[in-house]
Amino acid sequence: VQLQASGGGLVQAGGSLRLSCAASGRTFSRYVMGWFRQAPGKEREFVAVIRSISTYYADSVKDRFTISRDNAKSTVYLEMNSLKPEDTAVYYCAASLSGLDYRVTGYDYWGQGTQVTVSS
């Protein structure tokens, strides 16, 4: 599967953004889809994951971010609200045929990343 992330940009603290990740192929519904992020000088970290209707979030984004998917459009979304400067990072979507996973190594396919910058 090929993944294409979009929707990043520059936003002020407290603002919102919605990221999208479009997938190729006709088996999208079978994939567990995750969002990760990587800030400069830091390791890539888990943000959120969705399988069917089950979701799981990193503590740092819980209650602010919402992951969802539209299998008819082969797209996964990340709605980000109440953004903070520490949310600044390149955001990546990823796909896996395994179960819900928060580890980078748990995913086989990655998108190219989209930059999110939150100004204070």
Image: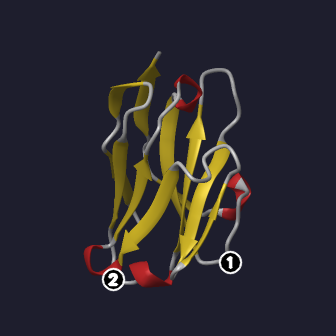
Task: Tell me where residue 78 sits by quadrant.
Answer: bottom left
Foreground tag (2 vs 1): 1
Q: Is residue 26 left or right of residue 50?
A: left
- Decide if residue 12 is on the left or right side of residue 60: left
In the rendered image of this protein, does residue 116 appear above or below residue 109? Answer: above
Residue at 47% in and 15% down = 120
In the image, what residue occupies the spot 48% across and 34% down? Answer: 83
Instruction: Identify the element where label 2 is drawn.
Output: loop
Q: Which mark is residue 26?
A: 2
Q: Which mark is residue 7?
A: none
Q: CA distance from mark 2 to mark 1?
A: 19 Å
**Residue on which disc 1 sits:** 99
Amino acid type of the residue tagged 2 in the rendering = Arg
Q: Amino acid at mark 1?
A: Gly
Q: Is residue 16 left or right of residue 51?
A: left
Q: Residue at x 36, y 49 (%)?
A: 19
Q: Name the residue at 43% across, 83% down.
A: 29
Q: Which residue is the extreme one toward the top?
A: 120
The mark that comes first in sequence, 2 or 1, is 2
